[in-house]
Image (cartoon, helix red, strand yellow):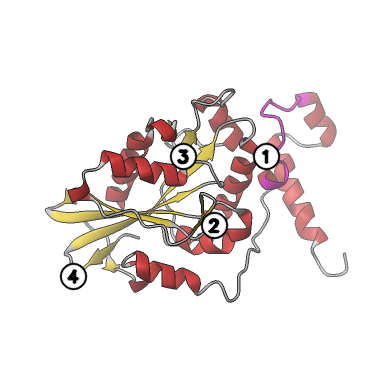
């Protein structure tokens, strides 16, 4: 839920960029720094980086359009894409007002994209309130990259989920993605919304870094496994209907539901 910063008299909307490592999350923020004039944004902050990979987060605050005459600030935050850093990304996703998923649409990058998106869906389901989602199919400039239709099918996205083709390294799709995220962020600042004060941990990049460091003592990457995460190399082609009939399932969704139930039974004591 969006919050209100009484000291600055501004609404605060957190837009969290999620996605696999090296998919282009940080590149999106770098291009935004080039697009947005310096008087309307902060400096981009990256507390720690190793060989070009974000280890904790990237932080950038952008001035958005006013809402009922009140200023709006968009806090753009990327999360580390490495699976072993999942405990660092989870609290950021849990406190997002809008989530932008940046996927690597190349054939080589799709397995990590599918695996990371499956984990994001788990985190989003664990939230107390739903969160708007924007998806970016990045690296459209690379050979063999999946177009948006194929990308939507592979991620099993609903038709009403915004999907933007992008080549973030050149800036293509970056502005469009931010524009959609801004519109969705404005919708969270409804006229009848009960906006709480901004959480101290998210006041700025320094306090957020201190907050995230608190998870280092007891890192926990445990999360339920999605069937899509297990079967990341599955073909996007439709399963033959005769095969489905042989397996006793009316649809691929039926089979996935049965697989989840089987996984649950195998984890019961004594099995």
Q: Are marks 1 and 4 in contact (CB under 8 Å)?
A: no
**Label 3 vs 1, first from the N-terminus:** 3
> Where residue 212 appears, x then y in whole percent?
47, 69
The label number, if any, that marks residue 7 in the structure image: 4
Whole-angstrom CA distance, mark 4 to mark 2, is 31 Å
**Label 1 vs 2, first from the N-terminus:** 2
Q: Residues within 10 Å of mark 1 (few under 14, many from 20)?
A: few
Secondary structure mainly formed by the magenta segment: loop
**Camera-nearest label, 1 or 4:** 4
Q: Are marks 3 and 4 in contact (CB under 8 Å)?
A: no
Q: Return the residue at label 2.
A: 123
Whole-angstrom CA distance, mark 3 to mark 4, is 33 Å
Q: Are marks 1 and 2 in contact (CB under 8 Å)?
A: no
Whole-angstrom CA distance, mark 1 to mark 4, is 49 Å
Q: Please, is residue 252 above or below residue 98 in the view?
A: above
Q: Residues within 10 Å of mark 2 (few under 14, many from 20)?
A: some
The quadrant in which the C terminus is found is bottom right
The label number, if any, that marks residue 253 in the structure image: 1
Picture quadrant where residue 194 is located: bottom left
Whole-angstrom CA distance, mark 1 to mark 2, is 20 Å
Q: Residue at x 64, y 33 (%)?
A: 108
Q: Residue at x 52, y 25 (%)?
A: 149
The label number, if any, that marks residue 9 in the structure image: none
- Evaluate whether residue 115 shows in this view: yes
Whole-angstrom CA distance, mark 2 to mark 3, is 16 Å
**Camera-nearest label, 4 or 2:** 4
Q: Who is closer to the viewer here, 99 or 34?
A: 34
Q: Return the residue at label 3.
A: 135
> Where residue 98 appears, x then y in whole percent?
39, 51
**Label 3 vs 4, first from the N-terminus:** 4
**Label 1 vs 4, first from the N-terminus:** 4
């Amino acid at each position: 839920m969006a919050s209100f910063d009484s000291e600055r008299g501004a609404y605060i909307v957190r837009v969290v960029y999620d996605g696999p490592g090296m998919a282009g999350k940080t590149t999106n923020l770098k291009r935004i720094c080039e697009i947005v004039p310096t008087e309307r944004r902060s400096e981009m902050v990256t507390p720690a980086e190793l060989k070009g990979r974000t280890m904790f987060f990237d932080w950038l605050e952008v001035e958005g359009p006013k809402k009922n005459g009140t200023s709006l600030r968009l806090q753009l935050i990327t999360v580390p894409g490495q699976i072993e850093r999942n405990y660092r990304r989870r609290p950021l996703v849990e406190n997002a007002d809008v989530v932008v998923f940046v996927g690597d649409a190349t054939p080589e990058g799709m397995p990590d994209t599918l695996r990371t998106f499956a984990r994001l869906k788990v985190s989003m389901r664990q939230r107390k309130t739903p969160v708007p989602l924007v998806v970016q199919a990045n690296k459209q400039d690379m050979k063999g990259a999946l177009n948006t239709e194929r990308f939507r099918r592979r991620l099993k996205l609903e038709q009403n989920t915004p999907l933007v083709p992008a080549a973030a390294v050149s800036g293509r799709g970056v502005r469009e993605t931010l524009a959609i995220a801004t519109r969705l962020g404005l919708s969270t600042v409804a006229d009848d919304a009960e906006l709480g004060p901004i959480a101290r941990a998210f006041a700025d990049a320094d306090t957020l870094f201190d907050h995230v460091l608190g998870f280092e003592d007891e890192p926990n990457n445990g999360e339920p496994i999605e069937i899509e995460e297990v079967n990341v190399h599955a073909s996007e082609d439709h399963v033959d209907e005769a095969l489905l009939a042989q397996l006793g399932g009316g649809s691929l969704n039926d089979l996935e539901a049965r697989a989840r139930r089987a996984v649950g039974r195998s984890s019961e004591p004594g099995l």
